[in-house]
Every structure is written in C-alpha cells, then in structure tokens.
Image (cartoon, rainbow, N blue to C red):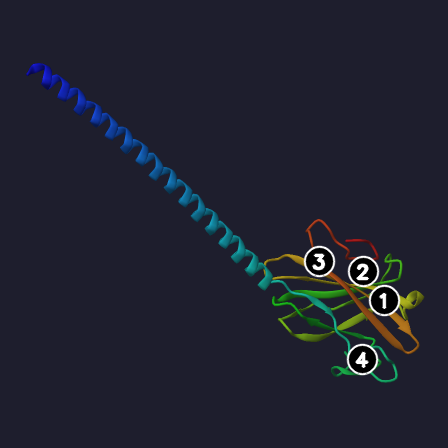
Amino acid sequence: MPMLMVTDWTEWTAIATFIAAGAAILLGLVTLGLVIVTRQMVGKASDEIKLERRRLEEASKPRVFPAPTGHWGDTSVYAGLQPGPGGPRQNPGGRNVLPVTNGGPGVALNVRAQFRGATGEHLVAETIPTSLGPDESRELVIKWQAEGIPGGQLRGLLHYYDISGVQWRTRFRIEEEDTRWLVEVQETDMISPQETDMISPSGQRG
C-alpha cells in the first residue's frame, strides 16, 4: 500500500508539472499575442496621427500667385487702381498693381511681392504687404523704384506666411510684349527661416 501511494503521488506530481508547464506556455502565447496586438494598435494609431497631422498641414497651406486678366498690363485697355490724392483712381494699363489670388486652402499672411531685373540682382519694385483668405483675390499696389522693365523682363517673388508661421514663396516672371505684360507663374515652395530671396530697398540681400 505505501508503495502504491508513492507511485500515485509521483504520477500526480508529474501531471501537475505537465499542467503547470502547459499553463506557462499558454500564458506565454497569450502574452505574445497581446504584445503583437498592442504593437499593431500603436502602429495604427501612429499612422492615423501622421495622416491627421498631414491633413491639417495641407489644410493650412496657402498658395498665392499672380492672376491677371487677359489685358493686365496693357496700357491701351486695362484699368487698375492706383492710390492718389483723394483716394484710389483709375490707372490705365494697371502697371501699378499686381492682381493676385490665394488658390490654397489656408490663409496667407503678410503677402508681398518683389520685382527684380532679368539678372535678379537689382530691386525694381515691391508691393505693400497684405493678407489673403482662401480663394480671395486682390490687387497689390506696386511701388516702383525704376521706370520700365529692364531688358524687357522681370523676375518676381511672392512671399507670404501660413497661420503656423511657415514662410512660402511663389516665383513668377513678367515679359513685356509691345504694350502688354505677359506673366508666367512658376513654382511654389516652402523656405526655411535661414533662407531668403528678399532684397531690401537699399538693394542688399536680406
């Protein structure tokens, strides 16, 4: 009888050990599954945050560009507004204004344009700063520092900020053809705080 009890105890001990090992393995598998699921959830949440951040960034981007009419700059047809004594007056040719539009979804702050000669070295004119909402158009008043277009061509830059303080620029070019001005809108890009294409009124780079 004692021998039988010892044998039974040994068997039960083995069975208990086997069950404990199985439980440990099962617990390990469950833990591994939880870790995998948690990582997937964290990764998905991170991707969703990135997508939302990108969506917000896209929604706040302005894009300001010259948007003249078909007769802009034509001294024989176009009439824009030019400041003068007693308020704005009609300015035949419209060469004292630059019509611009904000085609982006974000607000454009402190919009201003600068015009340089074909070589890009000398400041020819600049505009008075303003701000534009999405899809808003306006005529920027040009302050000329020289008469005419040197070499028949101007290089232009529109500088502005979005609501987060990021600075943007749109490049464009103006060519003179007989009595008309032709404008070519080029690329829009974001610029860093250390980079600038602006030129001060004294003619020095800012």
SS category of the residue bearing label 3: strand
Marks 1 and 3: which is nearer the front? 3
- At label 1, which amino acid type do we have? Gln
- At label 2, which amino acid type do we have? Pro
CB of mark 4 within 8 Å of CB of mark 3? no
CB of mark 1 within 8 Å of CB of mark 4? no
Q: Which mark is residue 120?
A: none
**How far is mark 1 from mark 4, CA to CA?**
26 Å
**How far is mark 2 from mark 3, CA to CA?**
24 Å
* Nearest to N terminus: mark 4 or mark 3: 4
Q: With respect to residue 85, does 36 lie above or below?
A: above
Q: Which mark is residue 145?
A: 1
| Rendered residue at 88%/77% (across/down) | 180
Q: Which mark is residue 201?
A: 2
Residue designated by label 4: 70
Quadrant in which residue 170 is drawn: bottom right
| Rendered residue at 24%/30% (across/down) | 19
Quadrant in which residue 8 is drawn: top left
CB of mark 2 within 8 Å of CB of mark 1? yes
Marks 1 and 4: which is nearer the front? 4
| Rendered residue at 88%/62% (across/down) | 117
Locate residue 58, reporting x and y percent: 60, 61
- At label 4, which amino acid type do we have? Gly
Neighbour class for label 1 at 10 Å: few (<14), some, many (≥20)? few
**How far is mark 1 from mark 3, CA to CA?**
27 Å
